[in-house]
């Protein structure tokens, strides 16, 4: 029971972090591209490509982590964790549509959902591997 409470706390904190960053103009695509240009000296076209990859990787990672948190908080119910994470991703994109300089994209929801699925499968793989190893030792 205590583990689930820990995971719920982490999950809620991560949801708050996501909503904070998606609700600020500082994390718009043009702003992150400008930062990439300044830090790397890349041309605007090159920085645009790096920015695209960076932003999509951030979606995969953030929602992958959120999926893991829901998975652990929900006592390893993978499908439910994926559903809730995907719904949260959709509501977050909707939220972004009200933030000046931000846009909502169903493609980002798909990327978020895929990040969640990948992360949950990785965690399930390592958990099952660990369980098998522990059952052999006993």
Image (tube, rainbow, N blue to C red):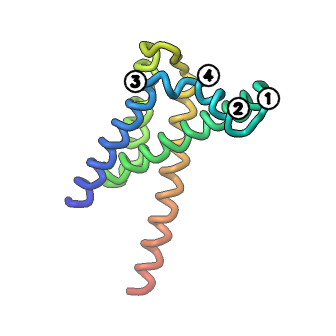
N-term-proximal mark, 1 vs 3: 1
N-term-proximal mark, 1 vs 4: 4
N-term-proximal mark, 4 vs 2: 4
**Residue under numbered circle 3:** 91
Disc marking residue 30 = 4
N-term-proximal mark, 2 vs 1: 2
| Spatial separation of the CA atoms under disc 1 and disc 3 | 34 Å
Q: Secondary structure at mark 1?
A: loop
Marks 2 & 1, CB-CB < 8 Å contact: yes
N-term-proximal mark, 4 vs 3: 4
Marks 4 & 2, CB-CB < 8 Å contact: no
N-term-proximal mark, 3 vs 2: 2
Within 10 Å of the Cα at label 2, are there few (<14), some (14-19), or many (20+) other Cα atoms? some
**Residue under numbered circle 1:** 43
**Residue under numbered circle 2:** 37
Disc marking residue 6 = none
Image quadrant in which you'd find residue 127: bottom left
Q: Secondary structure at mark 2?
A: helix
In the image, 19 versus 94, the foreground residue is: 19
In the image, 128 versus 26, the foreground residue is: 26
Look at 35% across and 53% down and name the residue there.
72
Figure label count? 4
| Spatial separation of the CA atoms under disc 3 and disc 2 | 31 Å
Where is 113 relative to 96, above or below?
Answer: below
């Amino acid at each position: 029971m205590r583990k689930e409470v820990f995971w719920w706390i982490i999950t809620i904190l991560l949801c708050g972090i996501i909503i904070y960053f998606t609700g600020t103009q500082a994390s718009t695509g043009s702003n992150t591209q400008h930062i990439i240009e300044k830090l790397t000296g890349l041309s605007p076209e090159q920085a645009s490509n790096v920015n695209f990859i960076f932003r999509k990787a951030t979606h995969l990672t953030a929602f992958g982590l959120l999926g893991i948190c829901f998975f652990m908080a929900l006592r390893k119910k993978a499908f439910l964790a994926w559903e809730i994470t995907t719904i949260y991703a959709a509501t977050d994109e909707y939220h972004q549509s009200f933030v000046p300089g931000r846009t909502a994209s169903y493609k980002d929801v798909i990327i978020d959902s895929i990040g969640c699925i990948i992360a949950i499968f990785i965690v399930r793989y390592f958990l099952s591997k660990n369980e098998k190893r522990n059952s052999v030792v006993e």
